[in-house]
Image: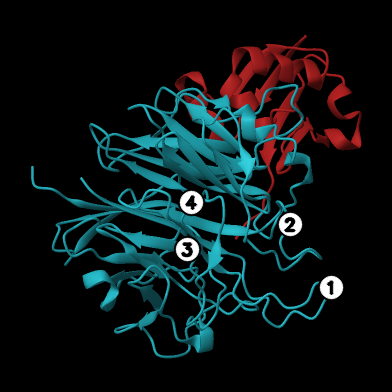
Chain colours: A cyan, B red
């Protein structure tokens, strides 16, 4: 069977699956699955027979993990969802990330309140990863606007990078047994100490397999005009590390705003990175004119990419997991908006068009060729 | 004493043959939930979180009374009582 492009679109009203040819001309839309229940994370697992996962975050009846083995024609619940031990005292409030682990059936799951779960059987059972979930710092983490969420799990061999809002960046270099806060150079605008050991509001972290040790971070920026204790903190929103996340430096110069949520890397070039700047107060497109900004030199300079997008009167937000890029030879970017539009940027974002314009508010977008 | 547990439509897929009612023997609401935890874990997990607390948007009624207006989980059950699981009307 010819390869197909699959897009998982997690929305406020359930998961949609779009499938089309690699030409990306037309997509068939299926769903919503998990009808009426918000989906905050999804995974297209291309290890072996492709499987689609989605978190179904039911405010009434609790959290579920959905799985499809037929490219999203039907979904069922995995045999269990992550859950804290009965005597732990914490209760699962949301599932923010589902990512593959080392083994073929290994999965990691980041949740609210900020904790990590691990499954070795494709999501049928889950174990709390104590090294981070019961970390000495955990009781001092504070919830951001979206709750106290572990939203980013980025695995690089035996290293695991976690993004916690608001806990900061945590790094394990022993496969997840232990974790250390690794926030040297990561600023926080909302604390008197501009560079605390932990407690930053990290929004997303991305990397590339061909640039070991290189990481990009979209941090909570927008503090250039802060006049409170500790003074202004310009350019703390977009960062880069070249030492596996031990230290970070700003690469925000040249962007219209250092506030944003997603950050992604070109699949074939670790120097090419994309962000979607928002105004820090409205968390919407600056001036009502949406644009993705691209750097082709690892963040030294940025160019605006918006051909085909509205030039004004667009005040949507693109959330942290709502932008992705496919791995075709000339990759396309995809982002979903809180106003329910899915945009596709062909040729690495050179030209944009709206593939779906009336979906429910979009929380997450994942794309893969299967 | 035998009571009836009314299952809301959205949870019936967890019951054998999508039943809308379950029969069980319990003297209090707490005992009824403990039985559900043992025998219908998916139903129980949809009503209560890991700490055992009733989920925020779930209301339990004994006949026409909200259990919070009686003795909460210690509300006693009499033969023939109906324990209803009612999702709160909310959302947008």
Quadrant in which residue B54 is drawn: top right
* Chain-order first, disc 4 or disc 1: 1
Q: Chain of mark 1?
A: A
Q: Which residue is mark 1?
A: A229
Q: Residues within 10 Å of mark 3 (few under 14, many from 20)?
A: many
Measured in 3D between alpha carbons, the distance from the residue under mark 1 to the one under mark 3, in whole angstroms, is 28 Å
Q: Chain of mark 3?
A: A
User: Residue at left 47%, top 38%?
Assistant: A159
Between A56 and A99, which is closer to the camera in this rendering? A99
Measured in 3D between alpha carbons, the distance from the residue under mark 3 to the one under mark 4, in whole angstroms, is 21 Å
Measured in 3D between alpha carbons, the distance from the residue under mark 2 to the one under mark 1, in whole angstroms, is 14 Å
* Chain-order first, disc 3 or disc 4: 4
* Chain-order first, disc 3 or disc 2: 2
User: Residue at left 87%, top 30%?
Assistant: B72
Q: Which mark is residue A60?
A: none
Q: Which residue is mark 2?
A: A196
Query: From the viewer's perspective, is the residue at label 4 or at label 1 nearer?
Result: 4
């Amino acid at each position: 069977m010819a390869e197909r492009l699959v897009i998982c679109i997690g929305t406020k009203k359930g998961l949609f699956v779009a499938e089309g040819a690699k030409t990306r001309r037309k997509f068939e839309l299926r769903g919503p699955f998990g009808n009426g229940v918000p989906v905050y994370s999804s995974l297209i697992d291309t290890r072996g027979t492709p499987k689609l996962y989605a978190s179904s975050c039911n405010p009434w009846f609790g959290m579920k993990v959905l799985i499809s083995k037929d490219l999203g024609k039907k979904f069922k619940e995995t045999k269990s969802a992550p859950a804290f031990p009965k005597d732990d005292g914490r209760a699962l409030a949301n599932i923010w990330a589902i990512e593959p682990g080392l083994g073929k059936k290994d999965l990691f799951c980041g949740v609210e309140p900020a904790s990590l779960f691990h499954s070795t059987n494709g999501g049928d059972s889950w174990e709390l990863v104590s090294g981070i979930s019961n970390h000495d710092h955990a009781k001092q983490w504070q919830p951001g606007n979206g709750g106290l969420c572990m939203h980013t799990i980025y695995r690089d061999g035996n290293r695991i990078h976690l993004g916690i809002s608001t806990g900061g960046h945590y790094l394990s270099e022993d496969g997840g047994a232990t974790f250390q806060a690794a926030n040297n150079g990561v600023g926080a605008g909302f604390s008197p100490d501009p560079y605390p050991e932990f407690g930053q509001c990290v929004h997303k972290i991305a990397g590339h397999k061909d640039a070991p040790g290189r990481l990009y971070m979209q941090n909570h920026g927008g503090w250039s005009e802060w006049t409170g204790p500790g003074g202004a903190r310009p350019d703390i929103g977009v960062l880069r590390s070249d030492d596996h996340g031990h230290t970070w430096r700003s690469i925000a110069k040249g962007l219209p705003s250092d506030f944003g949520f997603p950050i992604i890397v070109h699949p074939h070039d670790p120097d090419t990175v994309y962000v979607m700047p928002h105004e820090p107060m409205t968390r919407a497109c600056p001036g009502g004119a949406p644009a993705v900004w691209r750097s082709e030199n690892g963040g030294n300079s940025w160019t605006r990419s918006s051909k085909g997008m509205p030039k004004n009167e667009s005040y949507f937000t693109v959330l942290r997991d709502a932008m992705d890029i496919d791995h075709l030879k000339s990759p396309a970017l995809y982002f979903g908006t809180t106003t329910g539009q899915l945009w596709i940027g062909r040729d690495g974002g050179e030209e944009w068009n709206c593939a779906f314009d009336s979906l429910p508010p979009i929380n997450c977008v994942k794309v893969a060729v299967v | 004493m035998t009571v009836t547990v009314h299952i809301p439509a959205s949870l019936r897929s967890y019951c054998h043959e999508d039943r809308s009612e379950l029969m069980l023997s319990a003297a209090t609401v707490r005992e009824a939930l403990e039985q559900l935890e043992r025998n219908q874990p998916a139903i129980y997990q949809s009503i209560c979180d890991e700490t055992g607390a009733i989920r925020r948007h779930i209301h339990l009624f004994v006949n026409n009374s909200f259990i919070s207006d009686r003795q909460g989980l210690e509300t006693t059950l009499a033969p023939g009582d109906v324990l209803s699981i009612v999702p709160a009307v909310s959302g947008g």
